[in-house]
């Protein structure tokens, strides 16, 4: 297994989107709409303006792992004086390639991207499966996170 790591390109977006949808399904998301067009629009736009970056793992020309980091800004606060926040998403590894370090390598690469962007913090809504990885890499729970759906 010779895994190659590289940044996601536009030509790979169709496969990346399929893997994102598989990730959401695996996490138990209710699939009541077709997200493909909205995801394509989001990734295309934000890759172009530099507010989304993804590293992928490729084995023999096939994407086997994905990661994503969206960059947002809000007013600076004590926990993040830059106001720049990385939103981690799209962490998914093909089940046949799990537990060999792919997700950890992808995570390190997108965290470096957030650091280079000037982010002061990274946030994620982690699946049960992902909590162990993120905790092992230094992520901590923030009990203050709340959400209001509009």
Image (tube, rainbow, N blue to C red):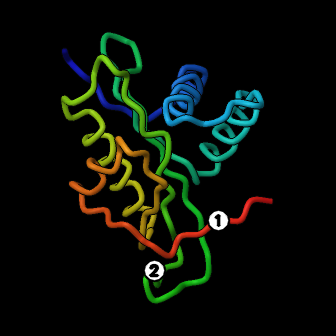
Write down the quadrant of residue 122 in the picture. Answer: bottom left
The quarter of the image holding the N terminus is: top left
Q: Nearer the viewer, mark 1 or mark 2?
A: 1
Name the mark on residue 147.
1
Q: Position of residue 28 (x, y in %)?
A: 55, 35
The quarter of the image holding the C terminus is: bottom right
Please name the residue shown 59% across and 64% down the image.
72
Q: Is residue 147 above or below residue 56?
A: below
Write down the quadrant of residue 35 in the picture. Answer: top right
Name the mark on residue 80.
2
Please name the residue shown 49% across and 39% down the image.
90
Give 53 or 49, whichever is nearer the viewer: 53
Real-space Cα distance between discs 1 and 2?
A: 19 Å
Please name the residue shown 21% across and 54% down the image.
136
Q: Position of residue 7 (x, y in %)?
A: 42, 35
Indicate left or right for 42 with 70 as reference: right
Quick one: SS at disc 1? loop
The tag earlier along the polypeptide, 1 or 2, is 2
């Amino acid at each position: 297994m010779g895994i190659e790591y590289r940044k996601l390109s536009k030509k790979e977006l169709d496969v990346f989107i399929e893997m994102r949808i598989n990730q959401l399904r695996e996490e138990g998301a209710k699939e009541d709409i077709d997200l493909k067009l909205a995801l394509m629009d989001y990734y295309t736009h934000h890759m172009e303006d530099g507010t989304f970056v993804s590293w992928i793992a490729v084995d023999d020309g096939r994407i086997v792992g994905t990661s994503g980091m969206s960059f947002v800004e809000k007013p600076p606060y004590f926990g993040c004086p830059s106001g720049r926040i990385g939103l981690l998403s799209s962490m998914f590894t093909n089940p046949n390639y799990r537990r060999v370090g792919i997700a950890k390598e992808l995570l390190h690469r997108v965290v470096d991207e957030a650091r280079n962007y000037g982010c002061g913090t990274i946030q994620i809504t982690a699946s049960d499966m992902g909590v162990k990885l993120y905790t092992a890499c230094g992520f901590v729970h923030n009990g203050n996170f709340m959400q209001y759906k509009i």
